[in-house]
Amino acid sequence: MTRGLLTAAVCVVALGSSEALGAQTANWLTVGAGATGIRLQSRFATGASSDVSGIAVGASSGVEFGRVALALGYLQGRLNADPSGTQQQDVIDGYALLVLRVAPWLRVKGGAEARSYVTAAGTEHFLFWQARLRAERTIVNPSVRGHIELWRALSTEVNTSVTVDRAQGGEVGVMLLRALGPLWAQLTYGIDDVRLNASARRQTLEALAFTLGYGGR
Amino acid sequence: MTHRLGAWGCGIALALALAAPEVHAQSDGLIERGVRAYQDVEFEAAATLFRRALASALSDSEQIQALDYLGAAEVFAGPQRRDSAQAAFRRLALFDPRHRPDPLVFPPQVLAVYDDVRRTTKGVRVEAPPEASFKPAVEVGGLVVRLHATSSHEIEVRVVREDGALIRTLYVGPVSDSIDVRWNGLDMNDDEVRSGRYVLSVASRRSVSAPVVRVVKLPLRAEIVVPDTIALPTLPDSLLLPEQVSLGAGAGSLATGLVAAGAAIALPSLVAGGTQPSGAQIAVAGVLSLAGIVGFVSEPGRVQRRHMAANAATRAEWQRRAEAVRAENARRRDTAHLVVSVGPATVIDSLGGGR
């Protein structure tokens, strides 16, 4: 199952890349793929905690229609077991966001992000309905841009009995573009914080991602 | 007569308004009565009627008709009236040198007197357009004046100033029937004349060495019309961007990079306070800081290059517009022309007598 999803993601990225390369002038379409270092910390009110990390690969794509855009992304990776007893688990994350450019430097996003933690014992699904705010600005004209993005879940659905008190996160990144022709590269650091069961459980996911993309921007 | 009754019927004002046509109507009547008197062999009465008609305002054809009949009536009035006949025919010859009394109306005796008078009368009729516009010194164009001579004689055509100073001699020589004389707006030195009042003078002589017997003067008003030229466009400094850029131009880049780096460092505590971040944000913060520093250093040079390129484009555009204005001004200067208005001719006659 997991392998199948990964294969599908790679195919999507490859297909998107080939279409973009063929179009050459398709600056309304952007695709990217990259690797992400993930660290997941879980802490419980009982004092127990776990801290696991791993590597994930993913792909993203965006289609822009004037001031409106659609952003899609998929990521899948494996978190290693740790000595505290946490089992090896897969993490799968995907999102679909509608983006509105309200100013040249400001974008408002809204949509859903689904995340699954898959262990031998079972799978825990989260679906965050979230709102995002992204500000970006050129640092070195015209090839380097920086951005800050914050998000908060408006509602969260979980397939288990846990309740979600709050989910929020943020991302800071730097992008190199134009210097590489139609290619762009991006380095981002993101962190999500989810509090569950009246703060009896807390999950923090950190991600350091490097993405190489084509088109758009 | 019907007109007169109608005019009285419509009141004094209307009668005054119709005064000019009334004169014609009266002269028409005089000429008709004169012709009837001539045909009734009442030459004295006819001459009197034609003289009265000529004293009133007549059209050219009426004047010619009246002079034809007046001269003929004087011829038949007797030898003692021969001078009067000659005077009438001389006036007719000078008025329209191309005219000859109709041989179907007037007998050879009258035509002989007329021909003799015309042959001995030395003068020209001057025909000129009311206005001529031309570029001075150009081979074609100019003010063209047609001179009709009563008979073969010598003429001298000159353009003089109002005070009589010679501007240019246009023609000196014989004229038998007619001749066109052209003035191209130049003076004796082939320089363009200035705007002002001039006189075109045609002096008639019986022969080269004979005294002037008649001078026709045509007042000319010359005006040089030069189209306005366009002012050259200026290039104010305010349109040019500064080409010396201080390091401050990169301050924005540095600030953006540092703020973003600070945000990366602060992000874990902002969204997930109380956690122990991995330190990965430091890497991103470092890249952002480095980008800010690179921007701080490179931005002034980039701004300078951009300003220089923009200024070069601005100067090129200004140069292009200036060249276009220069070309347009040259074209306009080249279209400068002389407008010559021609006034009514005046005649100084009988300087040397009729014969």
Image: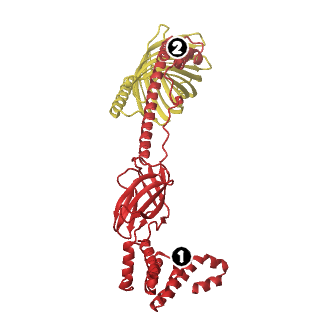
**Callout 1: 10 Å neighbours few (<14), some, many (20+)?**
some
Q: Say what amino acid the circle numbered 2 marks.
A: Gln
Q: Position of residue B253 (x, y in %)?
A: 51, 19
Toward the viewer: A137 or B351? B351
**Label 1 with label 2: CB-CB less than 8 Å:** no
Horizontal relation, residue B262 to residue B188: left or right: right
Q: How is the image coloured?
A: by chain
Q: Nearer the viewer, residue A147 or B25?
A: B25
Residue B57 disc label: 1
Residue lying at the far right in this picture: please name it.
B12
Element type at marker 1?
loop
Q: Chain of mark 1?
A: B
- From the top left corner, tell me how far across and down residue B172 is, in percent: 36, 58
The N terminus of chain B lies in quadrant: bottom right
Report x, y in % for residue A131. 56, 29
Q: Quadrant of the C terminus of chain B?
A: bottom left
Which mark lies nearer to you, 1 or 2? 1
Q: Which mark is residue B26?
A: none
A154 left or right, relative to B84: right
Q: Crowding at label 2, few (<14), some or many (≥20) Cα neighbours within 10 Å?
A: many
Q: Of residues B192 and A90, which is closer to you in this image?
A: B192
Q: Colour of chain A?
A: yellow
Per the image, the residue denoted by label 2 is A41
Secondary structure beneath dot 2 equals: strand
Residue at the top extreme, as displayed:
A83
Q: Colour of chain B?
A: red
Tell me, yes or no, if residue A87 can be seen here.
Answer: no
Tag 1: residue type? Ala
In the image, residue B307 above or below residue B214: above
In this view, the residue in front, B266 or B277, is B266
> What's the residue at 51%, 76% (across, down)?
B58
